[in-house]
Image: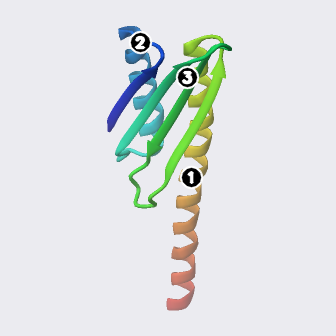
Amino acid sequence: MQLNISGHHMSNGEALESYVSDKMDNNVKKYFKNAVKADVIFSRDKQGFKAQVVVNEGAGQHSIIAADAKSQDVYASFDLAMYRLVQQLRKLKAKIKDHHKKEAVRFKNKVA
């Protein structure tokens, strides 16, 4: 998976990039092993930090899953955005599996 980490109005440190890379690999590949690309964008404003996470799942559904979150801490904002993204990934994975299962049952009923 190609991972792009960038920051607007701030610089990313080595620790933040390794933290993001580890979390993205563990959570995204748990649901979609063939994920094509992920972008993580951090920005700083007067209220704190904002993290935006965008993932192309690569499962042939042509879906782009996105989540964002704001917090006073850059790590907390990423964790909250990651939590929201994982919920969406889980829902999409269940939808794909359920869809295929219904097709198999319908095909068996037609053949029998």
What number is the disc on residue 92? 1
- Cα separation, mark 2 vs mark 1, equals 33 Å
User: Would you say the residues marked 2 and 1 are in contact, meaning their CB atoms lie under 8 Å apart?
Assistant: no
State left or right for residue 68 relative to residue 3: right
What number is the disc on residue 11? 2
The spot of residue 47 in percent (x, y) is 68, 14
Identity of the residue drawn at 60% across and 32% down: 68
Q: Secondary structure at mark 1?
A: helix
Q: Nearer the viewer, mark 3 or mark 1?
A: 3
Q: Earlier in the sequence, mark 2 or mark 1?
A: 2
Q: Quadrant of residue 81?
A: top right
What number is the disc on residue 78? 3
**Residue extending furthest left?**
2
Q: Secondary structure at mark 2?
A: loop
Q: Taking 15 as reference, is 59 above or below it?
A: below
- Cα separation, mark 3 vs mark 1, equals 21 Å
